[in-house]
Amino acid sequence: MYSTRLHNHLPTFGSTMTQQADIVLRGGKITTMALGSSAPETVDSIALLGSEVLSVTDAEAHIGNGTHVIDLKGARVVPGLIDSHVHFIRAGRTWNDEVRFENLYSLKDGLHALAERAASQKAGTWIRVIGGWDEHQFAEQRGPTREELDQVIPNHPVYVQMQYDYAVLNSLGLKTLGITTETIDKTPLPEGFEKDSEGSITGKASGMPLMTWFYRQLPAPSYDEQVESTVALSHEFARLGMTGAIDGGGVNTGPEAYAAVYEAWRQGRLKTRVRLFKHATRAGTEQADYAGYLRFGSPRFGDDILRFSGIGEVIMYRTHDRIAAPADYGEEAMAETREVLLECARKGWTVQIHVHQREFFLKLLDLWEEIDSIHPINQLRWSFVHAESTYLEDAERLKKLGAGLLFQSLLRYNGEYAVEAWGADRVAHSPELADLWDAGVPIGLGSDAMRVASYNPFASLEWFLTGKTVRGNKTLDEKYLLDRHRALRGYTQVGAWFTHEENVRGQLVPGQYADLAVLSEDYFTIPTDRIHTLTSDLTIVGGEIVWDSGALHH
């Protein structure tokens, strides 16, 4: 269904050499993201044949009796967006079980969304929001209370989690879990439940141990439900113009987590090009897991929709750091990391590594240079994920290694947290994004969704242009921000580089995949503070229309 289709249409319009296009989009502003002179930067029409772009310079000459012609009505078209670091697999398994707050901007709308979901479910079914939003995106500047949840959803247990910061349960949720003021201190429950001045539980709780405990109280969706849920997530990506996702695995994501996406792919229902980076199942299994991956796997094995692209983002769990929490970078931990990475280099695997702390980044950079002297890695596209503390002084070392950087809009939600941990001066140039870009280091942009960030690519793009948190505070210094063109390139053409696909996707030029999005408004002219409201009116993956809002039919 998704393989490249070679069409031999009969010539049209009297020319013996003109191929008839399957689809021609015309009358718009089409941003090609073309490199060099391969195509104009902007064109007004594009012809698609099979799964590829046929022409962007004489598209209308390829219209024949069987061509589907789409009038763009002046709309902006961009290459399909590629989220270069997102937890697609993990989110796909439970997507249909969760209410999403990412694209809502008032608590009133959030409560309405919860009530709508409850109305469609059997009484007693859990209603859940599990991360991906921040209370400061709401006009009310807060999340829901237990009492508000009780009022709008009295007949369902409800759990609403804000990032990994806190969660709120309604009364039925607490009752279902056997949590009362009387039992809270007498049962083996995680700490973190908030109490009021009279010692009664409020329904609010904090701490990752509690959240992990909660996840384990509920049965996982069935296999068939996980498949349907993964398909639904790929449609949601299409709605936002995303045609590609580089999946970074996810903590405690073992081999069983991939069954649903494999089945969605086998059924031909996966509408996103997914590239898998796998890491160890859990702490203590790293050596055995990587030995299996490297023994039985093959670099870049798969097809144009689903492909196993490499190893990462977590290599050793003991080195897994956070913005405010350094990890173990001692000699033993680095020796274990070296053993894994040396074998990856020897067998030609692409590697991506999660790193927040400058200390860890520099130790890895030294290690990569040592490995490169033994088994060259400069053609393998090794990359650092997050890597906020990367500066212009690191550029030449990165370029010699052929290494890239994967940056996300994490500080859109967590900017104040980063300032508290690192100080405003350090955050202002973490990373020195524009300087690194100008120095020629490959930089892919993404979200790191689903729990600690929004999956909305336009919300991420807005942050790369403004550096503002959802509270309106500045993070990156203005001189390190990207302009609209470079930010879009980081979400398209450069994103394809990290999976060795820059020659087949990320640009709208002849011979590349026909992956594109027709935007609801013009990305290049819409006010910057409204970029996050953009969606796609029409999304095409490999020449197939996978999302159509209907707007172009009016």
Image (tube, rainbow, N blue to C red):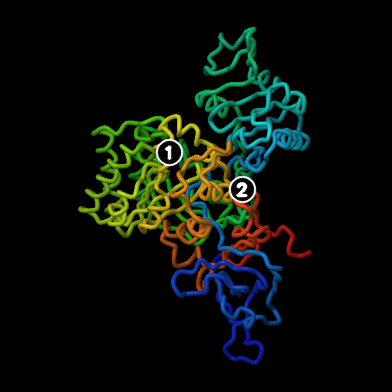
The location of residue 158, given as percent across then percent down, is 68, 27
The location of residue 5, given as percent across then percent down, is 56, 72
Q: Is residue 471 visible?
A: yes
Q: How many marks?
A: 2
Relative vertical location of residue 63 with respect to residue 99 in this rendering, above or below: below
- Lateral position of residue 325 relative to residue 113, left or right: left
- Quarter-wise, where is residue 477 in the image? top left
Viewer-closest of 209 and 519: 519
Q: Of the residues under marks 1 and 2, which one precedes in the sequence?
A: 1
Residue identifier under label 2: 529
The C terminus appears in which quarter of the rendering? bottom right
Mark 2 crowdedness (10 Å alpha carbons): few <14, some 14-19, many ≥20: few
Amino acid identity at mark 2 = Asp
The location of residue 259, given as percent across then percent down, is 53, 46
Mark 1 crowdedness (10 Å alpha carbons): few <14, some 14-19, many ≥20: many
Q: Which mark is residue 195?
A: none
Q: Spatial distance from mark 1 to mark 2, Cα to Cα?
A: 21 Å
Q: Residue at x 52, y 70 (%)?
A: 41
Label 1: state its secondary structure: helix
- Lateral position of residue 508 relative to residue 382, left or right: right
- Lateral position of residue 421 relative to residue 123, left or right: left
The location of residue 173, given as percent across then percent down, is 67, 23
Q: Is residue 267 visible?
A: no
Residue identifier under label 1: 427
The N terminus appears in which quarter of the rendering? bottom right
Amino acid identity at mark 1 = Val
Circles 1 and 2: CB distance less than 8 Å? no
Relative vertical location of residue 101 with respect to residue 228 in this rendering, above or below: above
Label 2: state its secondary structure: helix
